[in-house]
Amino acid sequence: MSEAMARTDPPFVGHERDLLTAFLDYHRATLMWKCDGLSTAQLSELAVPPSELSLLGLVRHMAEVERSWFRRTLAGEDAPPLYYSDADPDGDFHLPADVNADACFAALRSEWDHSRQLAAGRSLDERAQRARDAVSLRWILIHMIEEYARHNGHADLLRERIDGAKGE
């Protein structure tokens, strides 16, 4: 299974929006890089017991996070969960025995495309409502960078435990 995608270092200088989107895309690509070349079994491996984290679980989780912040919060769309439910709030991390890794990666890429479309043309200061709090698109982009960066740290550890591969 090859999930690699172009991983481009963000520029050192640029307009705020360009920097934010470049960093977000860099972290999106980093997660794919950490999954590159692994089988579905390896992607599903709970490599750091007793944690329920797996690389494929992280892919599914990030699809849910993208969907939540961009579709539900920013655009106010009715976008039901892909993997979790009231009965299984951590369903994104609970992989079924017959999990289809290609479908999980396709769902994440689809969420990226939709997220980019929803953010395009909106002011960074545009506000949306999240529960009782207003959030700006700027805040959402910064939060997404933080979310990917944190989980990419998990992905580093998982990948190294699975096959010894190391990277930045």
Image: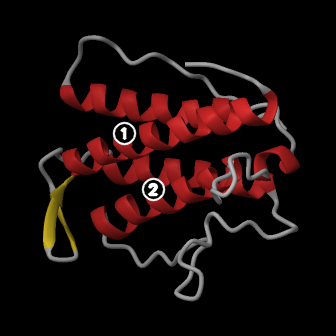
Depth check: give the residue in front, 34 or 117.
34
Asked if residue 3 can be seen in this view, the reply is no
* Left or right position of 44 against 57: right
Identify which amino acid the numbered label 1 is placed on: Ile
Which secondary structure, mark 2? helix
Task: Between residue 21 and residue 40, name the one nearer to us.
Answer: 40
For the residue marked with disc 2, what is the amino acid?
Glu
Rendered residue at 56%/22% (across/down)? 7
Give whichever of discs 1 and 2 has the lower sequence position.
Answer: 2
Left or right, 123 with reference to 49: left
Q: Quadrant of the N terminus?
A: top right
In this picture, residue 137 sits left or right of residue 82: left
- Picture residue at 60% right of the left edge, 32% below the top: 156
User: From this viewpoint, which residue is outermost toward the bottom?
Assistant: 87
Q: Which dot marks residue 66?
A: 2
Horizontal and vertical percent for residue 161?
A: 73, 35
Callout 2 environment at 10 Å: few (<14), some (14 to 19), or many (20+)?
Answer: many
Q: Is residue 54 above or below residue 89?
A: above
Measuring from the top left, give residue 146's x and y in whole percent: 35, 41
Please give left or right for residue 9 compared with residue 104 in the image: left
Nearer to us of marks 1 and 2 is: 1
Q: Is residue 72 above or below residue 162?
A: below
Q: Residue 31: x, y in percent?
A: 59, 37
Q: Which residue is mark 1?
A: 145
Q: Is residue 22 above or below residue 133?
A: above
Q: Residues within 10 Å of mark 1 (few under 14, many from 20)?
A: many
Which residue is at 58% across, 75% downward? 84
Percent coordinates x, y for residue 75 in the rendering: 31, 65
CA gap between label 1 and label 2 equals: 11 Å
- 15, above or below 102, in the image: above
Secondary structure under the numbered disc 1 in the rendered image: helix
Q: Quadrant of residue 160?
A: top right
